[in-house]
Image (cartoon, coloured by chain):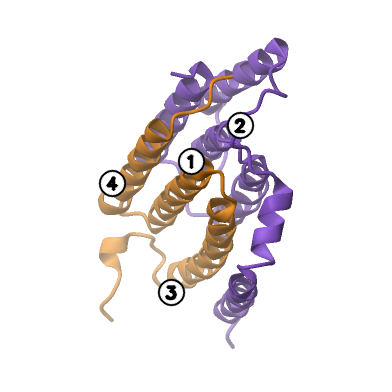
Chain colours: A purple, B orange
């Protein structure tokens, strides 16, 4: 079996187990970001580079930032991080970094799987046969925006 | 680089989904329940991408983009509800929800 895949899968599962067992929400968020990065590596290995980038940008970037904001807003628990809390996520992301360095050093980035589906094909499918779905996704986002605004409004 | 076998990737998606499900069932903190729902959605998205890659079609990735949109909207509304609930009850324990 592919070594890079096995390592990423191990990192993803380990990080996810740590997410659901942490007491502190900030620690769990750190592990969840690592887990999402590992899943993005696997998507890249599967030949879905566009979606792997989206996973990093939207999931690990935007959605996790929403969670961080909410944790700060409710101020429910201490968000002060002691240095020991960084060890676990650092080790797991270090494994991902080593994988990246290894793949780059072997120079096999161009040897992507034969079944690679690039962003161009995805875009043609998204705005071709799936155009109605794309418009419904836009409606859903608008509904989410209006809903979040309504719920978060300050009531007098 | 040898291509990833879809069976193992689907197995990983299943394991991640089950971990998220366990989290939703076991944890009583609303924030953790939302986090675990995110894990489950992500695992489902991974399964979509694996299936799309198996047949070399873009449909799996398109479905993942829809799932991403849905996850973003769900998180926005869910977290707004969470803040509202916390401001009223001063607790995030799911067992203490409901009632007057």
The label shown at residue B88 is: 3
**Which residue carries the number 2 mark?**
A114
Q: Which one is earlier in the sequence, the residue at label 4 or at label 3?
A: 4
> In percent of the image, x 60 and y 51: which residue is there?
B58
Q: Is residue A124 left or right of residue A8?
A: right
How far, Cα to Cα, is label 1 from label 2? 11 Å
The label shown at residue B54 is: 1
How far, Cα to Cα, is label 4 from label 2? 36 Å
Q: Is residue A156 left or right of residue B85?
A: right
Location of the N terminus of chain B by quadrant is top right
Please, which chain is the residue tagged with disc 4 on? B
Q: Are marks 3 and 1 in contact (CB under 8 Å)?
A: no
Q: Are marks 4 and 2 in contact (CB under 8 Å)?
A: no
In this rendering, the answer to whether A117 lies above or below A5 is below
Front one among A132 and A59:
A132
Assign a secondary structure to mark 4: helix
**Which residue carries the number 4 mark?**
B22
């Amino acid at each position: 079996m592919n070594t890079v895949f096995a390592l990423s899968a191990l990192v993803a599962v380990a990080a996810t187990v740590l997410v659901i067992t942490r007491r502190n929400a900030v620690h769990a968020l750190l592990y969840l970001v690592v887990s999402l990065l590992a899943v993005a590596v696997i998507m890249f290995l599967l030949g879905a580079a566009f979606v792997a980038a989206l996973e990093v940008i939207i999931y690990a970037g935007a959605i996790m930032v929403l969670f961080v904001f909410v944790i700060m807003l409710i101020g429910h628990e201490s968000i002060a991080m002691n240095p020991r809390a960084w060890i676990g996520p650092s080790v797991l992301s270090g494994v991902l970094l080593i994988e990246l360095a290894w793949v780059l050093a072997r120079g096999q980035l161009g040897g992507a799987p034969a079944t690679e589906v690039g962003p161009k094909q995805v875009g043609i499918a998204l705005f071709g046969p799936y155009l109605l779905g794309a418009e419904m996704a836009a409606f859903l986002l608008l509904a989410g925006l209006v809903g979040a605004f309504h719920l978060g409004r300050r009531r007098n | 680089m040898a291509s990833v076998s879809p069976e193992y990737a689907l197995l990983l998606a299943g394991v991640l989904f089950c971990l998220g499900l366990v989290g939703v069932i076991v944890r009583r903190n609303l924030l953790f329940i939302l986090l675990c729902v995110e894990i489950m959605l992500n695992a489902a998205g991974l399964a979509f991408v694996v299936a799309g890659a198996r047949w070399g079609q873009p449909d799996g990735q398109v479905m993942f983009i829809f799932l991403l949109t849905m996850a973003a909207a769900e998180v926005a509304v869910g977290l707004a509800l969470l803040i509202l609930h916390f401001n009223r009850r001063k607790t995030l324990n799911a067992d203490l929800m409901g009632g007057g």
